[in-house]
Amino acid sequence: MTNDIIARVELTIKNFDFTNYSFAKLQKPLTIDIYENWLNKGLNAEMQYLERHLPIKKDPHQQWPQAKSLIVFTQNYLPHPSPLTQPLPLKFVKISKYAQGHDYHFWLKERLNRLCLQLKEMFPEEEFIPMTDSVPLLERNWAFESGLGWFGKNTCLIHPKYGSFHFIAEILTTLELESQKETLPDFCGKCNKCIEACPTQALEENKILDANKCISYWTIETRKTPPRDIINNFGSWLFGCDICQDVCPWNIKAFSVKDMVKCNNEKDLIEDLKWILEQSNKQLLKKLKGSPLTRAGANGIKKNAIQMAGHYKFSELEVYIKKYLNYPVLSEICEWTLAQFQFTDNIKKDE
């Protein structure tokens, strides 16, 4: 009976063009102790919601008592499956590849909703709940348990054919489903390219990411000004960071190298930074509507632009940055950036 159910479910799933999918029994996650230890060490930085979600991640039945199984999906985002109608007006700053299209929390959830409706028609007595990473499930664990990849040294889920540039999503169900795939062995081997490439040393041995040092954390998750030893290694990343994925041989194999290149001329960045700083908060959010960049908020995007100007010492932007000195959430980063300009000017005078 179970094999017949799985065959019917799979036939329906194949109409929705996901990159890959599998099934997992809903139980205590295999990797929950590793995750809890990571939290206990404070490696989640100030993302306290991860700590609040721990009890549910450890025992999903606390939140979904009737659920028995997960249908787990991966969806590659190179090329992006939901491109923006109007491309982002940012040509040279670096933006994580997943964010170079519509926000996946909406279009991916909508696709899952449509699939759930069809499954509900087939199994009217069962329940199907669509989920993206906005719910407290240990999604990489379930993708691993269902055979969709292994944990790389960059902490991403990697598949030998599809690499790691993918979203992970789930449908929680009262159906009893079991994985038809074996868990994948670790194919990272002796490769340490991701660890060596991280400019802020956020990646540690044993597949550990220290969010306190991660560029993605500082450009998306927090409005605070980064420590000096971190900010000086941001480069031209405005939103997120892909370095540890860009250098991964499994991604180079799966995707064209040209997809990994953005800007070769630092001075070109000024055009993008000036555009950001000229916008009011309302204008900026309107022009970024539909993009994941709005998650950082207008002040978050401006903070990242200002700190980039300081890193590259783009004193041409001084007049724009001074406008934000009285903004409580931007004053500190403005002062730091303006100090970089002053320091550069003093060196030039001494020469």
Image (spheres, grey):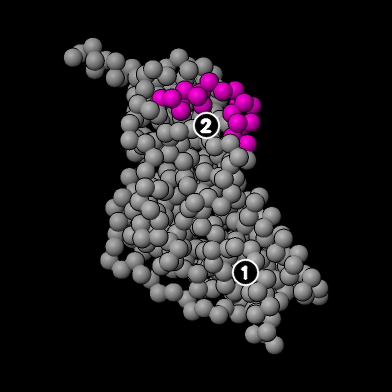
- Residue 64 on image: x %, y %: 71, 67
Q: Residue furthest bottom?
A: 1
> Who is closer to the viewer here, 209 or 15?
15
Residue at image x 41%, y 52%? 210
- Quadrant location, the N terminus: bottom right
- Direction from residue 24 to residue 345 in the image, left or right: left
For the image, the number of numbered tags is 2
Q: Is residue 137 above or below residue 283?
A: below
Quick one: label 1 or label 2, which is nearer the N terminus? 1
**SS of the residue under disc 2:** loop
Magenta stretch holds residue 278: yes
Residue at image x 46%, y 36%? 238
Residue at the spot of label 2: 89
Q: Which residues are magenta?
A: 270-289
Q: Is residue 222 visible?
A: yes
- Residue 229 on image: x %, y %: 34, 38
Disc 1/disc 2 C-alpha distance (Å): 35 Å
Q: Main secondary structure of the magenta part?
A: helix
Residue at image x 70%, y 64%? 115
Residue at the spot of label 1: 14
Callout 2 amino acid: Pro
- Direction from residue 36 to residue 191 in the image, left or right: left
> Who is closer to the viewer here, 2 or 28?
2
> Who is closer to the viewer here, 293 or 350?
293
Q: Is residue 62 visible?
A: no
- Residue 25 on image: x %, y %: 61, 76
Callout 1 amino acid: Lys
Q: Are marks 1 and 2 in contact (CB under 8 Å)?
A: no
**SS of the residue under disc 1:** helix
- Quadrant location, the C terminus: top left
Residue 181's disc is: none
